[in-house]
Image (spheres, grey):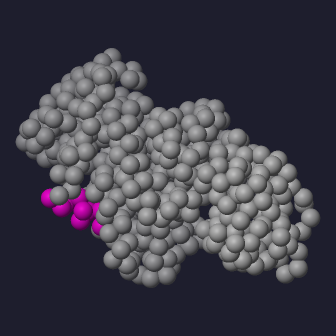
Amino acid sequence: MKRERRIKIIATLGPASATEEMCAKLFEAGVDVFRINMSHTQRETLQEKVAMLRGLEGKFRRPVGILADLQGPKLRVGQFGGDGGVMLAKGARFTLDSDPAPGDAKRVHLPHPEILSALEPGHHLILDDGKLRLVVEKASDKAAVTKVLIGGRLSSRKGVSLPDTTIAVSAMTEKDRADAEVAAEVGVDWIALSFVQRPEDMADLRKIVRGRALALAKIEKPQAVARMEEIIDASDAIMVARGDLGVEMPLEQVPGTQKRLTRMARLKGKPVVVATQMLESMITSPVPTRAEVSDVATAVFEGADAVMLSAESAAGQYPIEAVTMMNRIAEEVEGDAIYRSILESQRNEPEATGADAIAKASHEIAETLNLKAICAWTSSGSTAFRIARERPNSTVIALTPNRATARRLTLVWGVHAIVTKDASDADDMAFRACKFAVREHYAKLGDRIIVVAGVPFGTPGATNMVRIAFVAQEHVEKA
């Protein structure tokens, strides 16, 4: 199955996409990676979902990516007495404290001592997804006295966001640690960590995963934006999670932040996913708004590796239509003349490594000779990652003996992964690269392709060879 676009599509599983039949339809419509939201998934049923998605690989003879998204810490206020809520007037004083007694119009329990110990005067608290805003006037380990900047009704157990406060605890809860261990054990390809604040959060995830999956950092807090370069360095990929990011920082700053994150990730050669509310209206409508189409197109123009559907595919009335629309938008943008010029204007200089030099050379040769495909033999996937960083006009065909590597590459821009046994020598390497390029309809008789590999074969990180190969009749016959 050949995609006619380079950017990848991630779809979230949910009640609207719970069956293998529906997932097969979504894959046919364009999904490359399926996201399992651990906030709504029991560990006991995770293996069943993974097995269901793996069943698609036999049906379509293509690798299917699976992303497990950890819930992260859920910070909430305590319970109120009476009818379970109070009205907070603008300008009023309101205290959040360590007293577990039911709250009233003057105070409420904040069952997170780590927050109370971290708050300082001038810090803001955002409650109930941005509906209310407070500013701290006095703070201690036992209580924080605040002034109400934006009032409204506050009910029991509503969420708390802290745009100015770095909490001195890991982004991983005990539930996240258990979920990450199970997700790695059952063989998901990517594990996403929510509410990352510092690079050490990603180090915590890596210790649990131990290389069994790749680690993705969700950037949804201002603290993470402030340390974006360090966090990207500590991650295998990032996600611009615009939902919570738009709650914790001024909305008008989110588009610029999205662009900076996308470009920084591309500079580092790490995949970047743009997520949240991309086709939100298609939860209940068969067609998106014009603004949503423009939003998806912007992510494609910027060269993001993937765009993601959340409720649209998990609980919406039109999951297949949403995927189909996202696929159509991506194909249209990538066919636009200005698309290539934007990517080329943002191209970065290679790092001073052999792998980056080879990736750069293969891209320039392909551009100069107008070659159809760059075939990269890769064991770990790193060669394909580095070539994709160049955003070449040629398709990147990743040939790997490792099925796990092929599945992980489903998230990477422009990469078409194929599982095959390793090459025995240089001639076998070139022959089978040509054969697969023909079989997958990326080249035909008389075309030329580039073959990238490492010698000795099967050695991770040893990319050191570029070869131009001609597609001959024997390749067509064997395809």
293 in relation to 237, above or below: below
Give how far across and how far down residue 474 sits, in percent.
14, 37
Q: In this image, 228 relative to 440: left or right?
A: right
Q: Residue at x 74, y 62 (%)?
A: 146
Q: Quadrant of residue 281?
A: bottom left
Q: Is residue 408 above or below residue 245?
A: above
* Residue drawn where x is 56% and y is 73% of the image: 315
* Point 84% across, 81% down: residue: 83
Viewer-proximal residue among 364 and 267: 267
Q: Quadrant of the N terminus?
A: bottom left
Q: Quick check: 392 left or right of 321?
A: left
Q: Quadrant of residue 456?
A: top left
Rendered position, 152 above or below 300: below
213 displayed left or right of 437: right
Which one is in front, 399 or 344?
344
At 83% from the left and 70% from the top, the residue drawn is 106
In the foreground, 3 or 83:
83
Find the magenta span and give its range.
329-337
Q: Main secondary structure of the magenta part?
A: helix
Residue 398 x/y as whole percent = 32, 39
| Quarter of the rendering occupied by the C terminus | top left
Residue 374, image x, y percentages? 22, 38
How far across and down, in percent of the image, does residue 276 sit?
Answer: 49, 63
Residue 16 sits above or below residue 382 on the image: below
Q: Tell me where residue 449 sits by quadrant.
A: top left
